[in-house]
Image: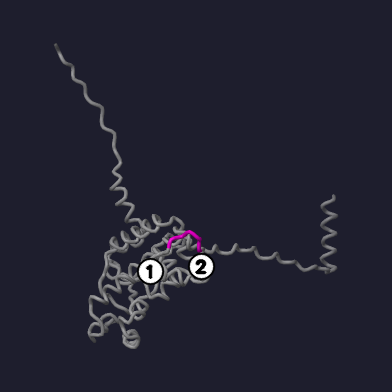
Amino acid sequence: MTVVGTTPPPRLPVRDRTAGRERGGGAVSPMLTRLAAERATGVLERERGALYLAEGRVVHAESPFAPGLDVLLLTHGTLEPGVWWEAVERAGEERGAARLLLDAGRIGRGALEVCHLGALYDAAYFALAPSSAPGRFRYGAGHWFGALRPVPVDAVERETLRRRELLDRLWPDPLPDSAPLLRADPAAAPLPPPRQRAVLALVDGVRTASDIARELGRPAFPTLVDVRRLAAAGLVTAQFPPVAQPPPALALPQVNDPDITLLKRLRDALEAL
């Protein structure tokens, strides 16, 4: 018996979801990715913060929504305020504040790196938030703190995405991250752990999560985690921003100029022809 072989149909292409996620992970800021590829030095200014680059790596980050490095170093006595401000005042282009502190033996390198990396990732999370406003890069600009431990751009972007996903899992509404917080106090809610109780004690209808982080001397992101957990437990709600009212219509002045009145009559007469 003769067996007739048939050619099997070609296999349909299957999308590699893992590769897709990896490609998407580098799309936090296309401009930042391009600057890293060209090993640029300067500052990328965005709507909610700024990232300082040296040869394509992130050396510092700032955001008004994240406590600065000074808050993390000074609040709990890691560094004396006078020592910090002396280094800030003496910092220049050749020697940043980080190098001055280390050379003077005012703080150990490990402790300074831990605090600086915490502040960097904290501010970068806000600086890389989705925005409709275009970013701007100023080539050659540096930061007075200096380069302590440069971080690759892809590491900053991966950590930013990881933080977004974690917060979304805890509570999908981002409003508590930036709005004034209100206490809900449900009767059957369980007692939160001590760290969250410290955050809850400062919720007064005026403070935001960033305000609470500064007052506690903590990084902003762990405070956002606590706030979202409190929101999920029904202990905290966000105050919605007031609805913007349209500006009142301008009242046009009445004009009684006889020349204008005559012109209007002539216009009406011509239109009637």
Q: Which residue is mark 1?
A: 195
Tell me the chief SS of the magenta region: loop
Mark sitting on residue 171: none
Q: Quadrant of the N terminus?
A: top left
Q: Which quadrant would residue 194 be assigned to in this image?
A: bottom left
Of 107 and 154, the residue lying toward us: 107
Q: Where residue 88 appears, x then y in whole percent? A: 34, 84
Residue at point 51% right, 67% down? 180
Which dot, 1 or 2, sits closer to the camera? Answer: 1
Q: Is residue 154 above or below residue 59?
A: above
In the rendered structure, which amino acid carries the disc numbered 1?
Arg
Q: Where residue 82 appears, x then y in whole percent? A: 34, 88
Q: What secondary structure is found at the residue carrying circle 2?
A: loop
Q: Residue furthest top?
A: 1
Q: Where residue 143 appears, x then y in whole percent? A: 33, 76
Q: Which residue is mark 2?
A: 180
Asked if the residue under mark 2 is in contact with the one under mark 1, i.e. CB atoms within 8 Å, the reply is no
In the rendered structure, which amino acid carries the disc numbered 2?
Pro
Q: Which residues are magenta?
A: 185-190
Residue at point 42% right, 59% down? 130
For residue 7: magenta? no
- Classed neighbour count for the residue bearing mark 2: other residues with Cα under 10 Å, few (<14), some (14–19), many (≥20): many
Q: Is residue 217 above or below residue 128?
A: below
Q: Where residue 8 appears, x then y in whole percent? A: 23, 26
Left or right placement of residue 239 versus residue 17 in this view: right
